[in-house]
Image (cartoon, grey):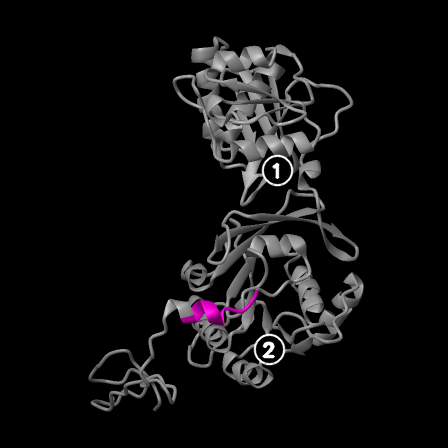
Amino acid sequence: CGATYLQWQGQCGSCQAWNSLRELTQTRSKSPDAGSPVKPVKLAELRRQQTPRQATGSGELDRVLGGGVVPGSVVLIGGDPGIGKSTLLLQASATMSEKRRVVYVSGEESLQQVGLRADRVGADANEIEFVAETCVERLLPILTHIEPDMVVVDSIQTIYSDAVQSAPGAVSQLRESTAQLVNFAKSRASAVLLVGHVTKEGHIAGPRVLEHMVDTVLYFENDTGSRFRIIRAIKNRFGAANEIGVFAMSESGLKEVRNPSALFVSQHPKPVAGSLVMVTWEGSRPMLVEVQALVSESAGSAPRRVASGVEQNRLNLLLAVLHRHGGVPMFNQDVFLNIVGGMKIAETAVDLPTVLASLSSFRDRPISNKTVAFGEVGLAGEIRPVPFGEERIRQAATQGYTKALVPVGNKPKQRIPDIEVIPLERLDQALDAAGL
């Protein structure tokens, strides 16, 4: 009757016949050279065979990728709907197609829709070869015949394999389709860029093994209502992880921001209480970010602690240190902390700016708008050093800041022109140096 079962049973539940089941073993077909031995290759030979990276035409995207697209690599790009994933890859494909062969696989949009989007953003997509195919078994022969330098798959959730009996987007389909595309990229030295959907929590949909299979994982971030986009490298086998690139969304697509420090710093005409600029380290470069704090008397029995861009538990810890070693109790105050521009800072260098900005708002004493600060605050009230201290100070000096409050361990060995460096050992010294 054609019914199938996962294990033996005496009677068929479909036609009610007895002892009519026959065991069938499904085996996956092997490639013709599956049994051929692999010849070892020395590292010296691999170094001579290395090919240069392929520039995408976008300096910020190349920075996040580690200098460009590596031939044979697989890149997974995730982000919220409408954030600009397809637009960015279409712009990069248009630039690369001027010198290299690029194939754009569209699984969500028709070719006419992709053409309309290319016209809207002003991308010269005349040399891009577009393919509307979602079956990976039919797609790979097309790519093998074309032999492209780069393949864009938009998106991986729409690709399916005939070898898996499940709907497109299922866990098994994602794993099988990605495995075949990874095998194609490694064997043909073609770079493959995959667009991935994200869940409501912001993670790429599908199993985490998908992120382990690829070489690079990029995430799009943005603040709600903001026209700026931040793309961050969560994993990168060919460059620095946690590297970021900053873009601005316009009517003609995504434009790279050359000086991100100016984006995350407000231009106050005069010093204001509760505001202080810090120098954070993102990937391989320093960036200036403004930390804003608002402290007001609480109207309820339980004061509120709200942190945007910084871990809230870290804020509670720093307020306790300020009370114990600075003599400033805030147990009856609401404390709100925000990082300008929607940035998220995970490093401990934000500790000292957080404490100083909070106390500045509490006492309503502005800190000079030409002052920057960074450093980790310990539970014993000490100011601990952070990595790349001298590079941070030099970046602040190039942006016109004249005073830097830094840990004593980050004091530069030689004087840096146009900026005064004040080394700090304890929290009380930091409060005095900031005039609080």
Identified by mark 1, the residue type is: Met
Q: CB under 8 Å between callouts 1 and 2?
A: no
The mark nearer the N terminus, 1 or 2, is: 2
Which type of secondary structure does the marked residue at label 1 adopt? strand
Identified by mark 2, the residue type is: Pro
**Residue sitting at x 67%, y 41%:** 260
Q: Is residue 52 visible?
A: yes
Q: Nearer the viewer, residue 124 or 149?
A: 149
In magenta segment, residue 430: no
- Residue 16 rendering spot, x and y as whole percentages: 27, 87
Q: If the image is split into quadrants, where does the C terminus sit?
A: top right
- Above or below residue 221? Residue 287 is above
Q: Nearer the viewer, residue 204 or 213?
A: 213
View extreme (front): residue: 414
- Residue 269 rendering spot, x and y as whole percentages: 78, 23
Q: Magenta segment, which residues?
A: 45-52
Which type of secondary structure does the marked residue at label 2 adopt? loop
Q: Which mark is residue 148?
A: 2
**Residue sitting at x 55%, y 28%:** 306
**Residue at image mark 1:** 287
